[in-house]
Image (spheres, rainbow, N blue to C red):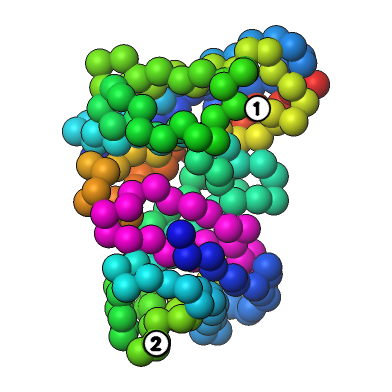
Amino acid sequence: EAGVAQSPRYKIIEKRQSVAFWCNPISGHATLYWYQQILGQGPKLLIQFQNNGVVDDSQLPKDRFSAERLKGVDSTLKIQPAKLEDSAVYLCASSLLAGTGILGYTFGSGTRLTVV
Amino acid sequence: LAKTTQPISMDSYEGQEVNITCSHNNIATNDYITWYQQFPSQGPRFIIQGYKTKVTNEVASLFIPADRKSSTLSLPRVSLSDTAVYYCLVGATGYSTLTFGKGTMLLVSP
């Protein structure tokens, strides 16, 4: 089974620029998550999708972050404009279906963003 | 969500058994305990999940006492490749959002 695919693997941008990350979940996984992981900390949930609808975006800084999951498959996370504190690894994860338990989360390898 | 407390770091040597204990004093009746492993430059990976007593798979064992206020992840005969951060998470079966703490950094030396 193919894993969760993310791109790009690395990205370096200047502050105030914009950036986008792409995620392709495991086929058939209805639930998709974006996490932000700052160096030395555990991942923090930014947004959760169920199919193409948002379930939880309470921790997403909506003034600069946006995410979409068109057609309930691939997802894009965008930051505009970026700040220095956005430097982190952005992880995408997917699971079969929300409500089936916390088993079955599969994470991608992440995108490492450096804002200079 | 039940809050978890685990050591920041642990050191071990190859071939030893490693036990990482996680405290979750306010665990709810329908909460499960799940452990994830994260290597540098990778996303977290599911290791094991349990509700009570003992669970064992090909990677680790999970010991949960009767009061369920703590749990212990046991890694038998660790190798250098077990060097990673280990996260303990607690959540209900029907609650699918994972909330991570800082985890335990395990360093295995030769």
Residue drawn at point x = 38 percent, y = 78 percent: B62
In the rendered image, the vertical position of residue B8 relative to residue A32, given as above or below: below
Q: Amino acid at mark 2?
A: Asp
Question: For mark 2, does the 10 Å Cα neighbourhood hold few (<14), some (14 to 19), or many (20 or more) residues?
Answer: few
Across and down, in percent, residue A35 comes to 51, 38
Residues at marks 1 and 2, CA–CA distance in whole angstroms: 42 Å
Q: Amino acid at mark 1?
A: Leu
Question: Is the N terminus of chain A in the top left, top right, bottom left or bottom right quadrant?
Answer: top left
Q: Quadrant of residue A92?
A: top left
Question: For mark 1, does the 10 Å Cα neighbourhood hold few (<14), some (14 to 19), or many (20 or more) residues?
Answer: many
The residue labelled by disc 2 is B67
Across and down, in percent, residue A6 comes to 45, 27
Give the extent of the magenta segment. B85-110
Asked if residue B103 can be seen in this view, the reply is yes
Tell whether B93 sits left or right of A85: left
In the picture, the disc for residue B45 is none
Q: Chain letter of disc 1?
A: A
Q: Chain letter of disc 2?
A: B
The residue labelled by disc 1 is A113
Tell whether B22 sits left or right of B51: right
Residue drawn at point x = 53 percent, y = 54 percent: B100
In the rendered image, the vertical position of residue B71 relative to residue A22, given as above or below: below
Does B97 lie within the magenta span? Answer: yes
Local SS, label 2: loop
